[in-house]
Each structure stands twice: as structure tokens, then as C-alpha cells.
Amino acid sequence: MEGFEGWDDYAPFYDWENAQTLGRRDVPFWRNLALNAGGPVLELGCGTGRVSLPLARAGVTLVGVDRSAAMLALARRRVARGRLHQNLRLVQADIRYLPFPPSTTRRSRHRFALVMAPYGILQSLLHERELAATLSEIHRVLEPNGTFGLELVADVPSWEEYRKRVSLKGWRGRRGGTYLTLVESVRQDRARGRTIFDQEFTERRGRQTRRHCFSLAFRTLSVPQMKRRLERAGLEVSALLGDYRGGQWDQRADVWIILARKPVVK
């Protein structure tokens, strides 16, 4: 299994599930970081625009990159509805090979003051070589003294294994529309450092029922492990945060955020 598998299937349910779990509680953190970046912003794994769209509405100029055509289709419709084309450009691309040519000037539209990877996107890179390639690309497209911010899903390394648990259920949209149920199983592949979520979404509308089954895999990297990889990629870690208000990180924190900067070469 590769880390990109399952995300096209997940697209129709992504916003519904996240509204009941993470919601938008991380958005003010990324918005504040972006507004103070002093230049254009790149979001890796922008998906349906859960983070990118609120930033664009706040006046941030940014590019959102995602591999999933299904996710981006939803985001593009929202950009059009919100008339946000001036601030937000969406690009279908693989984050291991960013589609921005090498910069020939100190300031270039292909360089970014902030690159951000919210809520576990780098954990979908299941192989060490994929993570190394992505971090190399991030270093390349960052402006000197630019910031890279990433969040790891905090509890993935110790997630309890279970089978066929009803995790969420409720209406999507107005009552009387579609009733969704998520039945989830969790598997830990500790030998390869992966957590696999087997998802079964059931849509019920009137007498019609449809089931959608797919799996999502995440790599179980800790904050210290990721910190070492950032440093190997030439980035200087500037902060380890344990909440969205800037509190200090420790192993028990509910939020795992790392901020790093690209040093200026003299």
C-alpha cells in the first residue's frame, strides 16, 4: 500500500468527518503564521481547501498543492463560489516533486516565505526516500529565512487497535438528506512503522444504501524523529509546539507542531 491510496475515495467524506473531529480549530494558528510570513505561502496536501480557503479569505496569497483530483475538484468549486482566484491557486501535483522550476533570482514567484503541511500530510509519505525527497523540495522552494511549519497527528504512534467500530454517524447537510455512518478498523504495522485505518462509509438516503470501503495509511514518526530529518534536510528547527496557542511541546501534548527555518547562506 502507498500513502496516496484511498484519498480520492475519501474526498466525498473528508469534510463531514473533519467537521466532527478536528473541525477548524487549527485554522487560526495557520492563518496567523501565514499573515506574518511576509510573502507567498505554499500549502502541501491542501485537499478540499479546509485550511487554504480561510487563509485566502483573510488576504493571504497562497498556492495549494495536492495529488488527489477528487479533493481538488471540491476545493476548486469552493474557490469559484468564494471568488478567491486572485489569492488562491490550486495545483495538482506530487509533493515529492514540486512543480516549481529552480529560482534564478533571490525573489521569485516560485519561492515561498512559508511552506505549511497541516495535520499529518507528511505522515502519508510511507517510505524514508519519499520523505527525504519532499523535505529536499521544501528546502528548495523556501526563501532564505523562510519558515516550514508541519503538524503530526499526535496519537497515531500509540493508536489503539480495534475492529469494526462505529466511529461517527449523522446527517450530511440538512436533516432528511444523506445519513452517514463510519465504521472503522485500526491496524498497527509496528515492524514498518505504519498505522492503517480501514474505513467503511455507509450512505443512506431514503431506502437507498451505498457502502464505500477504502484504507488510509500513515507513518508513525515522532517529533524527535521528524526533527532529525528536518535538520538533515538543511532546515533549522525553531520551535516545538504542543498546542495551537504556542505552548511548548512534550510527549503528552494533544498537538504536535514543528516550525523550522531555512538558514540564510552568507
Image (spheres, rainbow, N blue to C red):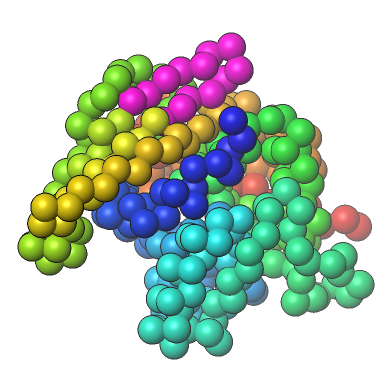
Q: In which quarter of the image is residue 77?
A: bottom left
Residue 23 position, x and y percent, is 29, 54
31, 80: nearer the viewer: 80
Q: In which quarter of the image is residue 229?
A: top right
Left or right, residue 261 beside residue 71: right
On screen, residue 29 above or below 223: below
Left or right, residue 46 beside residue 16: right
Residue 258 position, x and y percent, is 55, 42
- Magenta: main secondary structure: strand
Residue 132 position, x and y percent, is 75, 38
Q: Residue visible at 74% across and 58% down?
A: 98
* Residue sitting farthest toward the top: 191
76, 29: nearer the viewer: 76
Q: Quadrant of the N terminus?
A: top right
Residue 248 seen in the current view: no
Left or right, residue 69 beside residue 39: left
